[in-house]
Image (cartoon, rainbow, N blue to C red):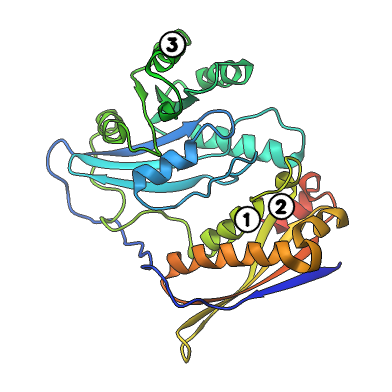
């Protein structure tokens, strides 16, 4: 096994840390609702961007590359009328590897438990075979209420949005169809209101300060992978994985020290990630460190090693070691 190391020194600015509180025991006012919704759709239809916009904080990484989301990530939305737990899942697709099959299995198990399934359709793309395939799969989850969300309406004109809404309405009898733009904050309040109205009456499921149940270690690994996805070819993103070896608080320097591994499947991919003279890996480290410092609220020392795990997407043992 070979490796390349990039070390990132801390910067001087950092944002606020995130605190996950325990769910309260008190009974809510009459009519308060809480429950789970999962956004589904083809890869890159805006599910993670919408999740982050509704939560008001980055809990899911975003990228134009395929297979960006690989876990069921929960984001918590708080409102006076209720609490919405968004379960952001990988895009449903026809798998080509064992990893792809495990991601589909994760989606299936998640959708079996949620109260509402919200299928996302980008306004700037015609409905295609992939959308129809996913729409058909929704019949396998009769328990969940089905909602349609037309995303990215800021990218097209009003007439095009209207045509897409009509096309979506013809796929099935949705409980509601909502056109939105997560980027321009168009109708996000409507999404929150309508989804909470479909949830069961319940006390809050998470504390009022909670935004996610992801651990800091998981979120840090994802931020490193997000930085690595920037600017790579369409094939390489499938082969990228990140694990955290060690995280240490340096009290004497008010510093978080992180040692991470960035995994690829072939030596040629390793060269792409590292770049000439380590320049590309240096950029990855800089972008990741900045995002991590915002998350943890303090300066970060980030050490990234690039390692090769041959054909890990198809190897059950290696998938287990990488957390899948």
Q: Residues within 10 Å of mark 3 (few under 14, many from 20)?
A: few
Position in image of residue 35 (x %, y %): 33, 38
| Contact (Cβ within 8 Å) of mark 1 with mark 2 | yes
Image vertical order of residue 252 relative to residue 290, above or below: below
Camera-nearest label, 3 or 2: 3
Spatial CA distance of label 3 from label 2 is 38 Å
Whether residue 161 sits left or right of residue 237 in the image: it is left
> Which numbered disc covers residue 163?
3
Image vertical order of residue 272 relative to residue 254, above or below: above
Q: Residue at x 71, y 54 (%)?
A: 320
The residue beneath circle 2 is 240
Q: Residue at x 41, y 20 (%)?
A: 157
Position in image of residue 306 (x %, y %): 76, 65
First of labels 3, 2 by sequence position: 3
Whether residue 138 sits left or right of residue 260 in the image: it is left
Q: Which quadrant is the N terminus positioned in?
A: bottom right
């Amino acid at each position: 096994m070979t490796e390349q190391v990039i070390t990132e020194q801390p910067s001087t600015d950092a944002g606020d840390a995130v605190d996950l509180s325990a769910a309260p025991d008190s009974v809510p006012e009459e009519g308060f609702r809480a429950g789970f919704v999962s956004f589904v759709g083809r890869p890159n239809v805006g599910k993670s961007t919408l999740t982050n916009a509704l939560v008001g904080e980055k809990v899911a990484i975003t990228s134009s590359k395929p297979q960006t989301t690989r876990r069921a990530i929960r984001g918590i939305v708080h409102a006076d009328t209720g609490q919405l737990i968004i379960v952001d899942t990988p895009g449903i697709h026809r798998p080509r590897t064992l990893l792809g099959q495990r991601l589909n299995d994760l989606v299936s198990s998640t959708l079996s438990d949620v109260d509402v399934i919200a299928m996302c359709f980008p306004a700037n793309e015609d409905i295609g075979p992939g959308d129809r395939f996913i729409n058909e799969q929704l019949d396998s989850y009769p328990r969940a209420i089905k909602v349609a969300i037309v995303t990215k309406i800021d990218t097209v004109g009003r007439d095009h949005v209207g045509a897409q809404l009509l096309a979506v309405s013809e796929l099935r009898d949705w409980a509601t169809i909502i056109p939105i733009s997560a980027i321009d904050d168009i109708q996000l309040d409507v999404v929150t209101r309508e989804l909470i109205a479909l949830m069961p009456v319940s006390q809050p499921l998470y504390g009022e300060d909670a935004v996610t149940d992801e651990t800091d270690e998981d979120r840090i690994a994802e931020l490193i992978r997000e930085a690595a996805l920037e600017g790579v070819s369409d094939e390489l993103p499938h082969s990228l994985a990140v694990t955290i070896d060690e995280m240490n608080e340096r009290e004497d320097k008010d510093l978080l020290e992180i040692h991470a591994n960035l995994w690829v499947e072939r030596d040629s991919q390793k060269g792409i990630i590292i770049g000439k003279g380590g320049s590309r890996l240096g950029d990855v480290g800089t972008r990741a460190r900045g995002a991590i410092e915002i998350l943890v609220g303090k300066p970060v020392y980030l050490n990234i090693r690039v390692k090769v795990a041959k054909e890990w997407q198809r190897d059950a043992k290696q998938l287990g070691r990488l957390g899948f």
